[in-house]
Image (cartoon, rainbow, N blue to C red):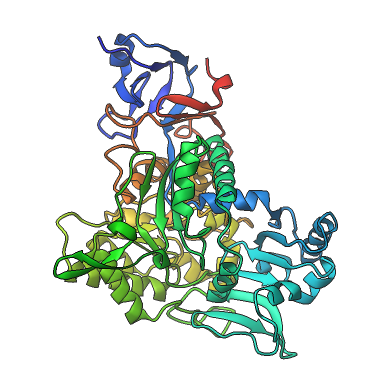
Amino acid sequence: MVKADAVFVNGKIWTGDPARPWAHALSVAFGRVAALGDDALQLPAAQTVDLSGRTVVPGFYDAHHHLALRGQRLAALDLGFHAAPSRERLLEVIAGHARILPEDSWVRGGGFDQNKIGGFPTREEFDTAAGGRPVWITHVSEHMAVASTSAMHRVGVTDLANPPTMTGGLIEVGEDGLATGLFLENAKKWFDSRLKPYPVSDIITSLETGSRIALTEGITSVADPGIGATNGIGMGPADLHAYQRAREQQRLHVRVTAMPYLTATHGIEHFEPGSDGWGLDLGLRSGFGDEHLSIGAVKVLSDGSLIGRSAALTCDYHDHADDGMLLFDPEELGATLSSLHRSGWQLAVHAIGDRAVEHAVEHLRRAQQSHPRRVLPRHRIEHCGMASDESVRRIAELGIIPVPQGRFLTELGDGFIDVLGTERADRLVYRMKSFLDAGVELPGSSDTPVVEAHPMKGIHDMVNRRTADGQPIGLHEGVTVEQAFRAYTYGSAYASHQEHIKGRLMPGLLADMAVLGANPFAAKPAELGDIAVRATVLGGEVVFGAESLG
């Protein structure tokens, strides 16, 4: 007789399977669900875990989670709103941190939002606060940053009256004709590239830090978008190597779908007789790997951020006579995406403004029309921050997966209303129910460290849709509790072509689970964000919170 590795008993187990949504017991063999309910109790087991009536759900899968960047941010100077709620306090924190550093050391940190602290700090303010040390502080969106004068000099910006110019980016110049220290979009990426690549040992440490924190939130899988780029959000060209090393050293504690950034791909000569290929070395592409570490979609930024007023809109911002920016020439980007699609890649286009979303949909439509596949590629639009009714319809028709972030609505929502106006924000921003009604499979994600990663916070916001100040933002786009849980489990697995191994608790699928402190399906909607994760189970092994289980 087969012997189970473990059996979990006396629980309220939400399986995510519509045919059998609940079970009271679950057995595990070889890291996968062996049986449910009374059948699970029939197998002898090496270990019995008493759930004591707690609610269990499939392990959360964050479909847009910058794991290494999160770990790096946790180790850096925290300048988020709670730590630095004003511009003056931000400068005080920088000054205090700089005093304990050697004179030549960099001051690195991030998380500020100019909309909340009264404007952008300047390089002169950083010069004074840090005593002349090089300072590089990133915006909460990671789409912009501010540098001190010495930091600018170190990366080659020595003529402050004539800073470099670049397509899809800007080094801001003030009224005095000199650079203010603000770097936007591609200019920020250009600056980042001067600081990279980071040592592999540092990346591994960041992965370990980020993945340990993820376990405390019930997260068992993440998709990390943008690895391998020196001019973007990746750590450097050895990112995938660092992931492999972290796994070998047992320092990668969650399952990862690594999404290479566009610039990590390249043309591959003689990829296939009679055609040109496009991908990573050796022709590696989406789908390569195993249940612990795999290659996912290729990521590309097509526009900026809403609160930074750099997302590409179809008309001007409510409070600013500008309609944002596209970071690539549309035809050039379309041709590149088509080449990647033809070579078998899944595509993930960052598009936040409604103009960028329209362009992304058209790029993906042309790629699929020119090179049809037998299996739907499930191309993705990361964020899909503003979508018209027509974009919703076309996304559903083409089988595209939008990847919105519920937590944005609370942490960034007041800023969305400021830059778009109440009517436009209410009608277009981070639509969810409309996608579900159109037949789209919706994933759940956070975009951490831009906002808090805890899935219960994200689920709360998908259901309640209110800003930090309590303003409603598209209440008609709110989803049910069950729909939000499906998004953060099955929906995210589906978005990465992995629903056959994870996202539900069914015999044969991975035994990844989150044990909750209360039953969210019986809770009041306003209480969802306060529900704690008591334990996390990966492949049938309790990897967090074992002391809370019998």
* Residue 178, percent from left and from top: 72, 87
Q: Nearer the viewer, residue 272 or 228?
A: 272
Q: Is residue 516 visible?
A: yes
- Quarter of the image where the N terminus is located: top left
* Residue 47, percent from left and from top: 43, 12
Query: Which quarter of the figure has residue 142?
Result: bottom right
Q: Nearer the viewer, residue 545 or 256?
A: 256
Q: Residue at x 41, y 41 (%)?
A: 485
Q: Would you place residue 143 above or below residue 326 in this image?
A: above
Q: Residue at x 84, y 71 (%)?
A: 128
User: In the shown orientation, is residue 190 left or right of residue 220?
Assistant: right
Query: Which quarter of the figure has residue 410?
Result: bottom right
User: In the shown orientation, is residue 297 left or right of residue 112?
Assistant: left
User: In the shown orientation, is residue 156 left or right of residue 204?
Assistant: right
Q: Residue at x 32, y 64 (%)?
A: 392
User: In the shown orientation, is residue 444 left or right of residue 199?
Assistant: left
* Residue 175, percent from left and from top: 72, 89
How many numbered marks appear? 0
* Residue 423, percent from left and from top: 49, 71
Q: Is residue 219 visible?
A: no
Q: Would you place residue 511 above or below residue 350 in this image?
A: above
Query: Which quarter of the figure has residue 155?
Result: bottom right
Q: Residue at x 50, y 42 (%)?
A: 246
Q: Would you place residue 315 above or below residue 493 in this image?
A: below
Q: Would you place residue 336 above or below residue 220 in this image?
A: below
